[in-house]
Image (tube, helix red, strand yellow):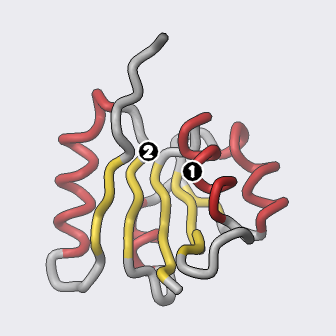
Amino acid sequence: MLKCAIIGLSRRGQMLINSVQGKSDKVTFVSDVTRTPANAADNAVNLGIPLSTNFSNALNYTNVKAIVSAMLHTQHAEQMTAIAAGIAESAIRVFRSPVIPAS
């Protein structure tokens, strides 16, 4: 089972979690990071996933092997640089949520 942390818990981030949590035998989310915990607290509690506002908490959470980025695209460069600095010595992989154009 691939244990993931997710950064960014807007609608897209919560959709990504809800699409696999408890439904997949290959992927599970074990840590969440968001700027606004109040917006995602209910979902995190319902799914039993620890919620944080700090990248290092996600990177240091036990057995995290992948980071899923679902944050605002305007913040990707800055936040991905911070994530990369924190995982330079680890075997963690980083995945970015694709841009979905408005219809």
Image position, residue 24 (x, y; %) = 64, 73
The percent position of residue 58, horizontal first and vertical second, equals 46, 69
Residue at (39%, 19%) from the top-left corner?
101
Disc 1 crowd rating (10 Å Cα; few below 14, some 14-19, many 20+) is: some
Give how far across and how far down residue 86 sits, in percent.
Answer: 24, 70
Residue type highlighted by circle 2: Ala
Residue type, numbered disc 1: Leu
Of labels 2 and 1, earlier in sequence is 1
Q: How many marks?
A: 2
Element type at mark 2: loop
- Residue 59 position within the rendered picture, expressed as x and y whole percent measured from the top left: 39, 73
Q: Is residue 69 left or right of residue 4?
A: left
Residue for badge 1: 16
**SS at circle 1:** helix
Please determine whether, in this image, residue 61 is positioned above or below residue 35.
below
Is 19 in front, or is 60?
A: 19
Residue shown at 38%/72% (left/top)? 66
Q: Please report the residue visible at 50 percent of the width from the left and 79 percent of the height from the top.
A: 3
Question: Which one is nearer the viewer's eye here, 65 or 34?
Answer: 65
Residue sitting farthest toward the top: 103
In this rendering, position of residue 91 left or right of residue 52: left
Residue at the spot of label 2: 70
Specify whether 84 is left or right of 92: left
Binning the other alpha carbons within 10 Å of mark 2 as few (below 14), some (14 to 19) or many (20 upward) gives many
Residue at image position (27%, 47%) is 79
Disc 2 or disc 1, which is closer to the eye? 1
Question: Based on the displayed image, in which of its 4 quarters is residue 100 positioned?
Answer: top left
Q: Is residue 101 above or below residue 89?
A: above
Q: Mark 1 and mark 2 in contact (Cβ < 8 Å)?
A: yes
Separation of marks 2 and 1 at Cα, in angstroms: 8 Å
